[in-house]
Image: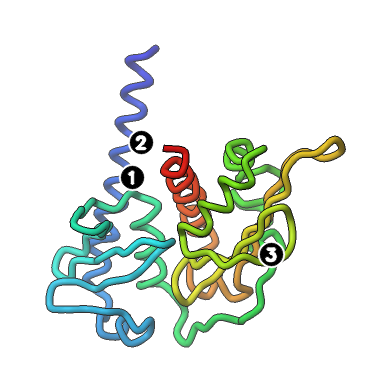
Amino acid sequence: KSCNRGIFMEKRTSNYEKMKNEMASAFLHYDQEQMIHKYSLKSDDAYLYIPFVGRDYRIDRYTGAVQQVNGAVILEADYNEAMTIYDVLCYAKAGCHPAGTLVNMNSLSSVRTGSLSGSGNFFQKTIDYFQGKTDLLSSACKALGGVEEKGGDVAFRLDIFSFLPMTLRFWDADDEFPASLQILVDKNILDYMHYETMMFALSHVMARLKEEASRVKG
């Protein structure tokens, strides 16, 4: 059984890498100057640069590869990172712009039956991780450049991208209710990315919060 599981995991990883490589190739067929203008991206002859959830990324202009830039450390972007960045750069609607109004992500009709449906709790692992640790969640949000807001036991405005904010609200468990997490996104977010890509983007936000929390815990 363990051998079969290993084969399955290897195949799944290979499929992820295959899709990422396909998107890198597809990226090269899009107008990079249009991307630069559309999002006011920094660029040079070799790379386009884009911040994503509190960290800098670069896209190779000749291979399409997405890399995470953490000071002097350069790492290959993982699947969620790369696919979100490709979607925003390549598939966003012409003339897309933030609505300036944030809505509960479950109110977006096109995600009601998808992976982000309220019928299941996509964020349960994150809720469990931060239950009883509101100070740790607050510190993690601040590390990502979050701006504190009202509502919940912890509430912060965070940037998915510099042009696309979200709000996170967390209520810790008490005698009557379990811990819960609410995510508000820009009303026009689906003009920037497919609804499936929201799963990748928000998965990455949750991963980054846990990463920053682990730094605080030491």
Contact between marks 1 and 2 (CB within 8 A): the answer is yes
Q: Secondary structure at mark 2?
A: helix
Q: CA distance from mark 1 to mark 3?
A: 27 Å
Q: Which residue is mark 1?
A: 16
Q: Residue at x 27, y 47 (%)?
A: 18
The kind of residue on which mark 2 rests is: Arg
68 above or below 30? above
55 above or below 180? below
Q: Residue at x 18, y 57 (%)?
A: 72
The kind of residue on which mark 3 rests is: Ser
Q: CA distance from mark 1 to mark 2?
A: 6 Å
Q: Quadrant of residue 155?
A: bottom right
The x, y position of residue 6, in whole percent, is 33, 22
Contact between marks 2 and 3 (CB within 8 A): the answer is no
The kind of residue on which mark 1 rests is: Tyr
Q: Residues within 10 Å of mark 1 (few under 14, many from 20)?
A: some
Q: Which residue is mark 3?
A: 109
* Relative side of 212 to 63, left or right: right
86 above or below 171? below
Q: Quarter of the image for the N terminus: give it.
A: top left
The x, y position of residue 15, in whole percent, is 32, 42
